[in-house]
């Protein structure tokens, strides 16, 4: 959904970081994987009997398929698509899952001054990163203004009542897109499934969102590598111990296209209606849940390096930023992130 490859956050066992012993130890565990939400999911397990793992793959796929059918903007019959198609502006019944995602999104949107906006769908579609095709030419200012007029978190409200959760809009054409947070939510959902199955040692991921609990097959903490913003999928920028937290990375260096001589990023600034053009190329966030991390990383990417740093310090977020410089890249981490850091690439600065 978010179109950030799993390679943006690499699992150490598949990093081949110059240590064959680690790879052999990782191979002793069980790895399940598949596809969902236009990306990949992966579940790594330690200390789980093969018989139990054999029946787990179907449960995982069923849960993720249900999430996709609820949150997808690509499926016309999904719960979210039905809300987007409804023009009555009356309170619309939604699941507790969707209420949770939107509540978190509205809070992060407010704290980022609208940089993270789940109503930005018309602009995402206008620039060709939604269900609509890539435009043949750069959208005009008139088209951008028209799409912007259909956006804004102020037009959306979640209400929890005794009879359930309700979502309401005051613009008939308001279009909610949860792509920026769907992977994080699905990752948390996988973690809950592992707990339901009595599994204590696991690392789960959907797309660029990852969450871990317990230890790996070698008895060590699960470790995750943050990728360098290059086309080399095994180039690690930093290595972290999640300590039971979730992590998510948003980057502008993979999902883009060229249009009218301009590089068009999939990250859209809701305020300008334009793809971002600043030098921040990667934002990684560690939080108590993958959903929380998945929401913050998008907002930080929109803001750019300086504003993202100020926000991370103000909100005490565990953040790692990579910025493109004239020669190479520079990195910055918040004090909270440093507590998770195991090592950083020698050329990181």
Image (cartoon, grey):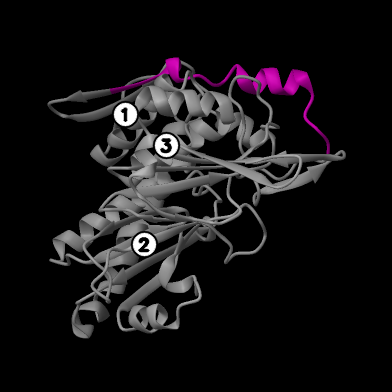
Q: CA distance from mark 1 to mark 3?
A: 11 Å
For mark 2, give the secondary structure: strand
- What range is drawn magenta here? 137-158
Task: Quadrant for residue 213, please give it.
Answer: bottom left
Would you name the residue on which mark 1 appears? 103
Whole-percent x, y for residue 173 in the image: 53, 24
Of pointers 1 and 3, the one earlier in the residue sequence:
1
The residue mark sitting in front, 2 or 1, is 2
Please state which of residues 157 and 22 is positioned toward the viewer in this rendering. Answer: 22
User: Is residue 304 in the magenta section?
Assistant: no
Discs 1/3, front: 3
Residue 41 visible within the image: yes
114 to 82, vertically: above or below: above
| Residue hosting label 3 | 295
Give coordinates of residue 214: x percent, y percent: 21, 62
Q: SS for tag 3?
A: helix
Instruction: Give left or right: position of 262 versus 305.
Output: right
Q: CA distance from mark 2 to mark 1?
A: 30 Å
Left or right, 347 with reference to 53: right
Q: Is residue 308 left or right of residue 244?
A: right
**Residue 108, quarter of the rendered image:** top left
Q: Give the crowd class for mark 2: few <14, some 14-19, many >=20 residues within 10 Å.
A: many
Q: Can you identify the residue that label 2 sits on?
A: 223
């Amino acid at each position: 959904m978010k179109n950030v490859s799993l390679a943006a956050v690499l699992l150490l066992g598949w990093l081949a970081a110059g240590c064959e012993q680690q790879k052999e130890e990782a191979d002793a565990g069980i790895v399940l994987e598949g596809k969902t939400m236009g990306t990949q999911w992966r579940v790594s397990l330690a200390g789980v009997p093969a018989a139990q793992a054999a029946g787990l793959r179907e449960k995982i796929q069923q849960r993720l398929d249900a999430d996709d059918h609820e949150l997808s903007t690509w499926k016309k019959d999904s719960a979210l698509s039905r809300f987007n198609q409804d023009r009555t502006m009356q309170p619309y019944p939604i699941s507790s899952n969707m209420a949770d995602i939107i509540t978190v999104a509205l809070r992060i949107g407010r704290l980022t001054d609208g940089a993270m906006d789940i109503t930005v769908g018309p602009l995402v579609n206008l620039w060709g990163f939604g269900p609509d095709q890539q435009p043949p030419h750069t959208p005009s200012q008139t088209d951008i203004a028209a799409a912007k007029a259909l956006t804004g978190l102020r037009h959306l409200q979640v209400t929890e009542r005794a009879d359930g959760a309700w979502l309401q809009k005051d613009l008939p054409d308001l279009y909610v897109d949860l792509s920026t947070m769907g992977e994080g939510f699905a990752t948390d959902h996988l973690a809950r499934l592992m707990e339901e199955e009595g599994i204590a040692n696991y690392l789960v991921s959907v797309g660029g969102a990852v969450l871990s609990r317990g230890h790996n097959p070698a008895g060590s903490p699960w470790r995750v590598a943050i990728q360098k913003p290059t086309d080399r999928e095994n180039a690690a920028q930093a290595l972290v111990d999640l300590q039971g937290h979730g992590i998510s990375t948003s980057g502008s260096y993979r999902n883009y296209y060229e249009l009218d001589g301009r590089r068009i990023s999939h990250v859209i600034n809701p305020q300008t209606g334009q793809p971002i053009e600043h030098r921040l190329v990667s934002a990684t966030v560690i939080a108590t849940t993958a959903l929380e991390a998945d929401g913050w990383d998008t907002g930080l990417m929109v803001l750019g390096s300086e504003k993202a740093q100020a926000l991370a310090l103000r909100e005490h977020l565990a953040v790692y930023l990579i910025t493109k410089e004239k020669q190479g890249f520079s990195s910055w981490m918040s004090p909270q992130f440093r507590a998770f850091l195991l090592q950083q690439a020698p050329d990181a600065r």
